[in-house]
Amino acid sequence: MVLNHQKPHGSSLVTDQNFCCYRGLIMRALTYHGAKDVKVDTVPDPIIEQQDDIILRVTATAICGSDLHLYRGKIPTVEHGDIFGHEFMGIVEETGSAVTSVQKGDRVVIPFVIACGHCFFCDIDLFAACETTNTGRGAIMNKKSIPPGAALFGFSHLYGGIPGGQAEYVRVPKANTGPFKVPGTLSDEKVLFLSDILPTAWQAVTNAGIGKGSSVAIYGAGPVGLMSAACAKMLGAEKIFMVDHHPYRLAYAQETYGVIPINFDEDDDPADTIIRRTPGMRGVDGVVDAVGFEAKGSTTETILATLKLEGSSGKALRQCIAAVRRGGVVSVPGVYAGFIHGFMFGDAFDKGLTFKMGQTHVHRFMPELLEHIEAGRLEPEAIITHRMSLEDAAKGYKLFDKKEEDCRKVILTPGNNTIVVPDTDTEALVGVPAAV
């Protein structure tokens, strides 16, 4: 029996063969099975659940640095069978009855933030603070009666438990607000990162006040850090320091974006080195913490985090506070949660620092960033090192996690193939290849 994708449905792992064959619609998706245990499984297709949903056929998806937090088991409420992925794009396959902004066949990039477009926060362009889309608890520990921020694709049940886009098909809620049409003249690779890392970097750098003649220190040379360097260079930053401990990343950033590289495995105090290389030893105008809560901290911090007595290492933030000048800005796109050990609040007060942080208001930045891509001022696809089939996603996670083969960024291409299911054989479908 040959099953073609026509009308999608479902979301969990396929374990009931009769159900699957009766529905006749299954797909391949990257699913979670435990810390550092992900697999490409056969699962039911998504279906239209609300009138403003669409079903997207995914043409390209990426593994994000934030996905590694999930992969490593560092984020609570991730469940067996959850589908990862919040950087993706594709072709609209089906639309709900209330969808007016896109139609079948449109090629769109999907913001990783799911926003309604009409609540208090959406009305002031703070889309990541949308009050209506997240049915989960959110990540605020001392939240009182405050509703959670926006739901996120593929990022735990704290953020709504919405299946992600590392799959052949995905349901996209609030489709009159989210999907962003892109021209056919640009390849998937050129526009894919409009979904997350490019707007995240742009928000980080503009929050830091970086412009012509500015100085900035970027902690972390992962995808967001590299995109931050690209944005800072385009905006005319005079000095861009980049701190990391992977030589291949630093070498790439130096060659491509002209950064001043600092390897913290070789330099015990990067902040002091940065300060000494700024006029009057004042420090930089702004800093970007693109590392987040998994920064390698002290032995004490490691023990506390392991015992779940604190949520985050404060090492990167301490460095940022030290490296920035008085009156400067600490911009934090890196993910943090819970308590932070050794947060130097007194130093921040004494220096009169401003902190800007949080999830990215992706929708706000997509049009402007697309213009920069079309004009050739930004080339986000340059950081891609590995291109794989969705079927090889588990290998991609391992490479990215272990920084093997000088991996900077992994792109996955779903097969979107017809799936052949035997008429008589009722063996479990989980793990069946997309074309057998």
Image (cartoon, helix red, strand yellow):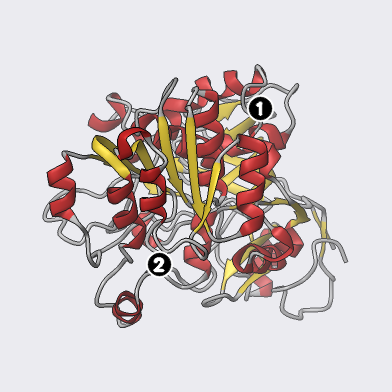
Label drawn at residue 75: 2
Label drawn at residue 336: none
Q: Is residue 386 found left or right of 372 in the rendered image? A: right
- Residue type at mark 2 is Ile
Can you name the residue that lies furthest to the right here?
Answer: 436
Q: Which residue occupies the foreground of this view, 17 or 407?
A: 407
Structural distance between the alpha carbons of marks 2 and 1: 34 Å
- Disc 2 or 1, which lies upstream in sequence? 2
Relative to 425, is 81 above or below?
Answer: above
Q: Nearer the viewer, mark 2 or mark 1?
A: 2
- Residue type at mark 1 is Asp
Q: Is residue 217 visible?
A: yes
Name the image quarter holding the C terminus. Answer: bottom right
Residue 90 placed where, x, y %? 67, 38
Residue 21 placed where, x, y %? 71, 66
Q: Mark 1 sits on what residue?
A: 106
Residue 263 placed where, x, y %? 53, 57
Q: Residue at x 54, y 42 (%)?
A: 260
Relative to 329, is 315 above or below?
Answer: below
Name the image quarter holding the N terminus. Answer: bottom right
Q: Which residue occupies the foreground of this view, 220 or 386?
A: 220
Q: Residue at x 48, y 50 (%)?
A: 153
